[in-house]
Amino acid sequence: MPLVSTNLPLVQTNHHAQLNALGDATRRGILSRLLSGPLPVGELAKEFPVSRPAISQHLKILKEAKLVVDVPSGNRRLYQLNPEGFDSLRDFCDHFWTQALAAFKEKVEQEK
């Protein structure tokens, strides 16, 4: 059986950081919470069983992965989802979905 990597085209992507960021339950929870709108670190920290500095570290990872952005608001920063980061991630995942559907179609047509 051939290795998968020999059958896939080489695609240069920046999605490793995004996928790694999504691998943590707390970070996924932060993203879910931000669906309701921008929040400061302190508000986010109230909703999780980890310290405020830990939430800040999670936000740093999400920001580096371009899944969140922060905007100044007075003397604090509000974190919000970055639509462009999610568009990029969706495009990356859609590539695999398209390939899977094409393979399924080919298999069905071969069996006819």
Image (spheres, rainbow, N blue to C red):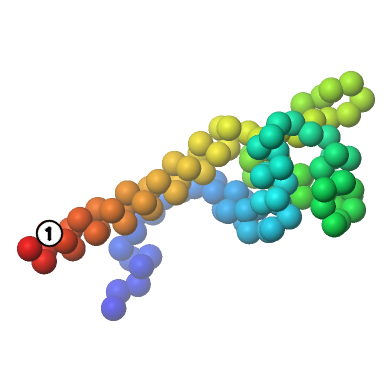
Q: Which residue is mark 1?
A: 109
In this figure, what is the number of numbered marks? 1
The quadrant of the rendering that contains the N terminus is bottom left
Q: Position of residue 103 (x, y in %)?
A: 25, 58
- Going 58% across and 53% down the picture, which residue do you hit? 19
- Going 38% across and 53% down the picture, which residue do you hit? 96
Q: Residues within 10 Å of mark 1 (few under 14, many from 20)?
A: few
* Residue 70 visible somewhere in the drawing: no
Q: Position of residue 62 (x, y in %)?
A: 69, 45
* Residue 4 visible somewhere in the drawing: yes
- Going 12% across and 59% down the picture, which residue do you hit? 109
Residue nearest the viewer, comparing 30 with 102:
30
In this rendering, would 32 be left or right of 16? right
In this rendering, would 8 be left or right of 25? left
Tag 1, which secondary structure? helix
Locate residue 85: give its quadrant.
top right
Q: Furthest residue to the left?
A: 112
Q: What amino acid type is highlighted by mark number 1? A: Glu
In this rendering, would 109 be left or right of 87? left
Residue nearest the viewer, comparing 66 with 109:
109
Q: Furthest residue to the bottom?
A: 1
Q: Furthest residue to the top?
A: 74
The quadrant of the rendering that contains the C terminus is bottom left
Q: Position of residue 59 (x, y in %)?
A: 76, 44
Q: Position of residue 107 (x, y in %)?
A: 18, 63
